[in-house]
Amino acid sequence: MRTEEYAAAMRREIIRMLAAAGSGHPGGSLSATDIMAVLFNEELRIDPKDPRDPNRDRFVLSKGHAAPALYAALALKGYLPVEQLTDLRKLGSPLQGHPDANKLPGVDVSTGSLGQGLSQACGMAIAGKLDNKDYRVYAVCGDGEQQEGQIWEAAMLAAHYKLDNLTAFVDHNHLQIDGDIEKVLSPEPLADKWRAFGWHVIEIDGHDLAAIRAAIDEAKTVKGQPTMIVAETVKGKGVSFMENQASWHGSAPNAEQAAQALHELGEG
């Protein structure tokens, strides 16, 4: 499947599962979709037949509320049947509201408490170096998450230990549950902050698949530094009435809204 098709399919599944659940987080799932489509369809060295392969690449969704995007990516990769996605948030389902590594193969670490995922990714990267493994660790963080102090502790640690096997993304859609991040608690100048903390920084359009690919490739050439890819994105990308609307941070579409969204996303 071409990555453009993979991303489009992810977006449709995100809408379907959220509509079925009646709750969840569409805005930040849709903004991170293109990044995750490139990672899961092209880049990550993973195998759904061997989800605990010690030599696999690792993926950490630090912004764990975007779990629908992760579940859609995993289903399209073959970790679970696509039909199972509508079990999102149901009692006893492995598709919890935030990723649970104990319930779903393909989830490398449980996340959801913002700020902690990047630290976990650092631990995985350190373990890889200690074990002389050549796997890479990828993390996707939110931009509202940049307000967490633990993010900057992890930033300092990763640079100190020269974790060049770690590549992180900031899904920079400029909105969080309470509104514009710049008004709530601005992390700007974001790219300059990461540079000041000793990271190699790449700034891209987070919906340009070629730019995402090129940034990942560049990160693999960097030695002695972790890489942060600051990806400019649109919250709710692909659904007209969700785009750039903070109100869709944690609100699920009803049946009529889901039908409109799926139509806009190429279904039917």
Image (spheres, rainbow, N blue to C red):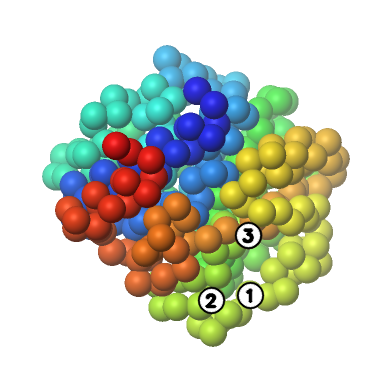
For marks 3 and 1, give the one nearer the viewer: 3
Dot 3: element: strand
Report the residue marked by disc 2: 181
Mark 1 vs mark 2: give the one in front.
2
Q: Earlier in the sequence, mark 3 or mark 1?
A: 1
Q: Amino acid at mark 1?
A: Pro
Mark closer to the chain start, 3 or 2: 2
Left or right of 122 on screen, residue 93: left
Whichever of callouts 1 and 2 sits on the residue coming sooner in the sequence is 2
User: What whole-number distance in Å separates the C-alpha atoms at marks 1 and 2?
Assistant: 8 Å
Q: Are marks 1 and 2 in contact (CB under 8 Å)?
A: yes
Q: Looking at the picture, does residue 159 appear above or below residue 6? A: below
Pick the front one: 264 or 233: 264
On residue 45, the disc is none
In the rendering, which numbered label is found on residue 187?
1
Residue 144 location in percent, x, y?
52, 69
Q: Which residue is mark 3?
A: 232
- Residue at 23% across, 31% down: 84
Question: Pointer 3: residues within 10 angstroms few (<14), some, or many (20+)?
Answer: some
- Callout in the foreground (3, 2): 3
Q: Which residue does the image show at 59% across and 49% down from the upper left?
A: 207
Q: Mark yes or no: residue 114 visible.
A: no
The image position of residue 266, as x and y in percent, is: 38, 40
Instruction: Kindly give the residue lying farthest to the left in the view shown.
Output: 91
- Which residue is nearer to you in this view: 128 or 31? 31
In the displayed structure, 253 sits above or below 47; it is below
